[in-house]
């Protein structure tokens, strides 16, 4: 194993922002392809994989955050646990805003939501190419700063590429040590196994709060379909015995809760009855074992 593999980082990122601020343009720029973008199609799944960005030392998985942009689900009206849970499961959130405009109500709501989850957030002030006098951005930054705490502000232009190298470095710099969830550049659609893993992982993170690190991984070990029933067995892989105990909980209560919540959500996403069997595996330093990572087959 080389040193660079030792320090491989990976994580899940969601881009938020109201329509037309440039989210899709930004994502296209980062991914370097138009193929991965599914944003204008109606969401058939609730946790859409938007694209996987690979660099030599990092893999960043962009996930849509379902529910946030639906007009009937304004954030302040009903901050659903689902949305909050999804955001908690991310490693980084990017709020995109128009650098020329004071925060509108939707922006305020988005910032409010970000304040309620513990996931770090960056504010991206997009369309700087349209601003002749850059100092006009300062009051906008100040107004956003008053609304909530962002780790950093980035003036960017998703269209011209201005500021994107700095932003990309900042994103990678905030990813935790982790595996290459997806092999190479092969993923173009939304493999169902990925959702099973991602949603179970999300429930683990949410229901264990800060007690289990984000490096926890969920590996689908068995997948069987018959007569409208999907039977899935999945292992929650942690690195320490203590983490195993936390996930299982007293008399298995927490693992049961994780399983029930994941199953109910997956049944909605995948549109069929699911029998979900979960167990916890301790694999010490699994992230440093390339063979183990190769065993993981994300494709259905
Ligand atoms: P989304 O609704 O947030 O996904 O926004 P889009 O990515 O679809 O962009 C909305 C419009 O803004 C499109 O016409 C883009 O070409 C344009 N746009 C996005 N980013 C920039 C930018 O940095 N500068 C300029 N001038 N236009 C941009
Ligand atoms: Mg879009």
Image (cartoon, rainbow, N blue to C red):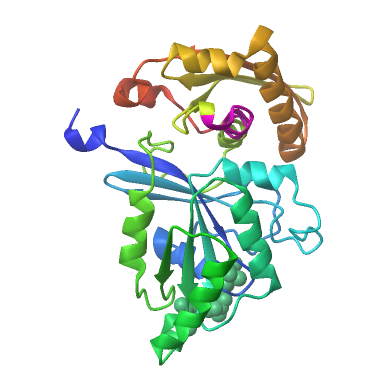
At 36% from the left edge and 42% from the top edge, which residue is drawn?
Answer: 184
Q: Is residue 204 above or below residue 61?
A: above
Q: Quadrant of the N terminus?
A: top left
Q: Is residue 164 above or below residue 258?
A: below
Residue 265, given in percent of the width and then of the height, sits at 73, 35
Q: Is residue 43 visible?
A: yes
In this picture, residue 212 sits left or right of residue 47: left
Residue 39, given in percent of the width and then of the height, sits at 61, 61
In this picture, residue 34 sits left or right of residue 102: left
In this picture, residue 210 sits left or right of residue 79: left
- Corner quadrant of residue 291: top left
Q: Is residue 22 visible?
A: no
At 40% from the left edge and 22% from the top edge, which residue is drawn?
Answer: 295
Magenta stretch in the rendered image: 200-210
Residue 129, given in percent of the width and then of the height, sits at 41, 84
- Corner quadrant of residue 32: bottom left
In magenta stretch: residue 132 = no
Return the residue nearer the eye: 10 or 53.
Answer: 10
At 34% from the left edge and 20% from the top edge, which residue is drawn?
Answer: 285
- Corner quadrant of residue 95: bottom right
In the picture as drawn, the residue positioned furthest to the top comes out as 251
Main SS, magenta region, reads helix
In magenta stretch: residue 203 = yes
Residue 104, given in percent of the width and then of the height, sits at 66, 75
Return the residue nearer the eye: 162 or 253.
Answer: 253
């Amino acid at each position: 194993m080389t040193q660079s593999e030792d320090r491989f980082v990976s994580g899940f990122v969601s881009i938020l922002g109201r329509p037309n601020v440039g989210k899709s343009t930004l994502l296209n720029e980062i991914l370097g392809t138009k193929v991965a973008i599914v944003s204008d199609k109606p969401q058939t799944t609730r946790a859409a994989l938007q694209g996987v960005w690979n660099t030599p030392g990092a893999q960043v998985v962009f996930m849509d955050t379902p529910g946030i942009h639906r007009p009937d689900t304004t954030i302040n009206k009903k901050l659903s646990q689902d949305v909050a849970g999804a955001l908690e499961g991310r490693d980084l959130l990017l709020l995109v805003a128009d650098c020329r405009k004071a925060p509108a109500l939707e922006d305020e709501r988005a910032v409010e939501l970000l304040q309620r989850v513990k996931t770090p957030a960056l504010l991206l002030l997009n369309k700087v190419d349209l601003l002749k006098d850059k100092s006009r951005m300062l009051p906008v930054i100040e107004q956003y700063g008053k609304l909530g705490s962002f780790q950093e502000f980035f003036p960017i232009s998703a269209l011209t590429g201005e500021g994107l190298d700095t932003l990309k470095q900042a994103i990678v710099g905030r990813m935790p040590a982790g595996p290459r969830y997806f092999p190479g550049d092969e993923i173009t659609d939304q493999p169902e196994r990925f959702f099973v893993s991602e949603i179970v992982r999300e429930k683990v993170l949410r229901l264990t709060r800060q007690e289990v690190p984000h490096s926890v991984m969920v590996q689908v070990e068995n997948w069987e379909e018959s007569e409208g029933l999907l039977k899935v067995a999945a292992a929650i892989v942690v690195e320490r015995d203590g983490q195993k105990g936390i996930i299982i909980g007293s008399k298995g209560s927490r693992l049961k809760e994780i399983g029930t919540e994941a199953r109910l959500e997956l049944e909605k996403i995948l549109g069929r009855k699911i029998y979900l069997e979960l167990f916890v595996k301790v694999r010490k330093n699994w992230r440093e074992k390339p063979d183990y990572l190769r065993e993981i087959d994300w494709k259905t």
